Image (cartoon, rainbow, N blue to C red):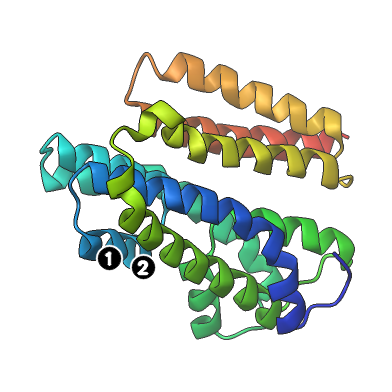
Amino acid sequence: MGPSLTFRTGVRDVLPTVFGYIGVGLAFGIVAHTSHLSLLVVAGMSFIVYTGSAQFIITSMLLLHDPLSAIFISTFLVNSRMILMSTSLAQYFRHESLFKNLLIGTLVTDETFALAMNKQNKTSGKLSFAWQSAANLVAYLVWGVATIVGALLGGMIADPTRFGFDFALTAMFIGLVYLQLISDRRLGLSLQLMVMIFVAIIYYFMIGLMSQNFALLVATVAGCLFGMEMKKCR
């Protein structure tokens, strides 16, 4: 990953990341098919909802015939972390129009956010609309196509959990955390590990008082505030 911020560079930089999208997308498509969701529903979720973690949750909730209100609330809570990510990313695009910022925010994901944070370490804290759009768009298209292919292949696998497909999303997040730890020298390994431990502790205590999704949101916000204070003290 070099300092260039062109559209072509964005496509090249995101390519290693989309291999994870292919694996998780295929897994989701297979799980969705075995959960009796149609190809149209799978495509709709991937290109409209476009959020891996929430799509797995929506699929399981539909299978259990949960009410739409519960599905909407769960989806919002699971993806509320995107508010924090988009806010953090917005500082690099203050000079761009509101429309361009909305385009970036609409398609940003955990993976493209992590990629952007790694990229700005190589560019003295700079990002461009062309580069970010390329990364977002390629990830978006690959995810959608992968889930559709997975749904088409789903008829060949009767029990996807037997092959660990339900663990695919967790495995991808573990990889993202590892890449963040080894690539961000600006924050330092000790500070990042300290924040991770803090978030885990907060989540452990909160999960006994509220739902898993809301506990995760509280722990994430608390972790951001804790990290900001620790960074000031350095």
Q: Quadrant of the C terminus?
A: top right
Identity of the amino acid at label 2? Phe
Query: Horizontally, is 7 left or right of 21 in the view?
Result: right
State whether residue 9 appears in this view: yes
- Near mark 1 (Cα within 10 A), the count class, few <14, some 14-19 or many ≥20, is some
Number of numbered callouts drawn: 2
Q: Where on the picture, by quarter, is residue 123?
A: bottom right
The quarter in which the N terminus is drawn is bottom right
Q: Is residue 192 left or right of residue 112?
A: right
Residue 49: x, y in percent?
33, 60
Describe the element under mark 1 as helix, strand or loop: helix
Q: Name the residue type under label 1.
A: Gly
- Circle 2 is placed at which residue position? 47
The quadrant where residue 88 appears: bottom right
Q: Which residue is mark 1?
A: 44
Residue at the far front in the pictured view? 156
Q: Which residue shows up at 79% across the image and 62% down it? A: 119
The residue lying at 48 percent from left, 71 percent from top is 141
Q: Which percent across, then down, holds residue 52?
A: 43, 50
Indicate left or right for 212 with 138 as reference: left
Residue 31 against residue 213 in the figure, above or below:
below
Tell me whether the residue at label 1 lies in contact with that at label 2, contact meaning CB atoms closer than 8 angstroms.
Answer: yes
Q: Is 114 rendered above or below residue 209? A: below
